[in-house]
């Protein structure tokens, strides 16, 4: 098996990079010879995944956080459209959130992860595709494998990614702290949500999550019933309310006990359109795409059933 590694050297405060001699030894023990290439900037994982796929690699392992995994998957999907569809994605998670790996039940120990990868079969999973407005006002699009959302989550992403303590303190602590601090400065967004060309749902929201997997935000189980291969999104709408009460109830998100909360609506669908209720740019909610916040609504989300090979 031809194995490629895409290593984000700063993910998890550089833990994998520092321990690379031991990681490389475990890789060779479980998977044989491999080629490792490092990312240097945003977008590198996507580019390297395309290169690995075009060079005939069977397995491409994203060694980093959710952003690295998402970019790698995006590159593999782009390569597949060009006919290079042999490569499967796998994960060696060490990032701030690692929510996609959490949803897969991946162990924390590197040796245990690689033993699982070596033993498991390839499965086909759904991915999402999002079109949105980037920070320069241009239309942009990309794939996501776990969760894309909008509202408070976009602000939290930007705050977490800019925090100098990222990678040095537990992800759950950092995400919770930043959620609290951003929440009290956050102005709720007025949006219109349309699911599968159904009746539009208009309202003031704190968060709208379009989920392929169950976890985001460093361990919040926002979509407890989400499945990676059912051909549908779970759509969670958290409506605006009193900030003190909502902040108190955010704890429910960590255990999935928000299903019956009066401010929460959970729906399912294959296509979701979210538009500002008012056309002004300053009313355009920030989007979160697998832990990154590259733009804002209007945004359209579409499921791609069983489009990606996963070996995890």
Image (cartoon, rainbow, N blue to C red):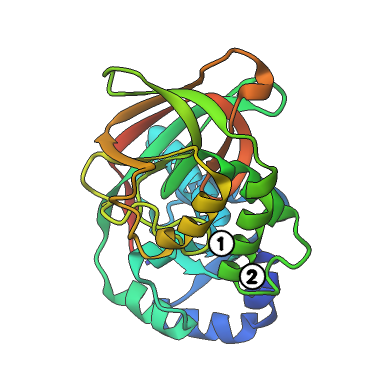
Q: As drawn, is 106 to the left or to the right of 204? A: left
CB contact under 8 Å: marks 2 and 1: yes
Q: Is the C terminus in the top left, top right, bottom left or bottom right quadrant?
A: bottom left
Front-most of residues 211 and 130: 211
- Dot 2 falls on a residue whose secondary structure is helix
At 53% from the left edge and 43% from the top edge, which residue is drawn?
242
Where in the figure is residue 262, as x and y percent of width and height? 34, 44
Q: Residues within 10 Å of mark 1 (few under 14, many from 20)?
A: many
Query: Relative to residue 277, is residue 22 depicted above or below?
Result: below
Q: Residues within 10 Å of mark 2 (few under 14, many from 20)?
A: many
At 57% from the left edge and 46% from the top edge, which residue is drawn?
243
Q: Which residue is mark 1?
A: 65
Count the marks: how many?
Answer: 2
Can residue 130 be seen here?
A: yes
Q: Is the N terminus in the top left, top right, bottom left or bottom right quadrant?
A: bottom left
Real-space CA distance between mark 2 and mark 1, rounded to the nearest whole angstrom: 7 Å
Whichever of labels 2 and 1 marks the residue nearer the N terminus, that label is 2
Examine the image and state in which quarter residue 106 appears.
bottom left
At 58% from the left edge and 87% from the top edge, which residue is drawn?
22
Front-most of residues 182 and 159: 182
Where in the figure is residue 24, as x and y percent of width and height? 56, 80
Q: Which residue is mark 2?
A: 12
- Dot 1 falls on a residue whose secondary structure is loop
**Given the current orientation, which residue lies at the most extreme left position?**
230
At 64% from the left edge and 70% from the top edge, which residue is drawn?
12
Can residue 90 be seen here?
A: no
Front-most of residues 192 and 300: 192
Query: Relative to residue 207, is residue 273 depicted above or below?
Result: above
Q: As drawn, is 256 to the left or to the right of 41? A: left
Query: Relative to residue 13, is residue 279 depicted above or below?
Result: above
């Amino acid at each position: 098996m031809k194995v490629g590694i895409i290593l984000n050297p700063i993910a998890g405060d550089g833990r994998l990079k520092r321990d690379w001699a031991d990681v490389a030894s475990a890789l060779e023990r479980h998977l044989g010879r491999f080629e490792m290439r490092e990312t240097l900037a945003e977008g590198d994982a996507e580019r390297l995944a395309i290169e690995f796929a075009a060079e005939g690699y069977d397995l491409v392992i994203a060694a980093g956080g959710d952003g690295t995994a998402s970019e790698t998957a995006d590159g593999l999907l782009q390569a597949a459209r060009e006919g290079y569809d042999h490569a499967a994605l796998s994960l060696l998670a060490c990032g701030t959130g690692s929510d996609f790996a959490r949803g897969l039940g991946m162990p924390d120990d590197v040796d245990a992860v690689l033993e699982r990868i070596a033993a498991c079969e390839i499965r086909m999973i759904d991915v999402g595709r999002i079109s949105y407005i980037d920070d320069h006002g241009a239309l942009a699009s990309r794939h996501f494998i776990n969760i894309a959302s909008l509202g408070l989550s976009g602000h939290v992403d930007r705050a977490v990614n800019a925090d100098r303590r990222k990678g040095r303190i537990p992800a759950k602590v950092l995400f919770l702290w930043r959620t609290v601090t951003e929440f009290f400065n956050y102005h709720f967004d007025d949006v219109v949500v349309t699911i599968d060309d159904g009746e539009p749902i208009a309202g003031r929201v704190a968060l709208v999550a379009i989920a392929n997997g169950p976890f985001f935000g460093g361990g919040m189980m926002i979509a407890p019933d989400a499945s990676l291969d059912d051909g549908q999104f779970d759509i969670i709408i958290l409506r605006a309310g009193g900030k003190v009460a909502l902040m108190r109830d955010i704890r429910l998100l960590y255990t999935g006990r928000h299903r019956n909360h009066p401010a929460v609506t959970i729906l399912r669908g294959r296509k979701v359109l979210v538009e500002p209720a008012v056309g002004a740019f300053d009313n355009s909610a920030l989007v979160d795409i697998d832990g990154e916040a590259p733009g804002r609504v209007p945004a359209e989300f579409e499921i791609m059933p069983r489009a990606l090979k996963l070996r995890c």
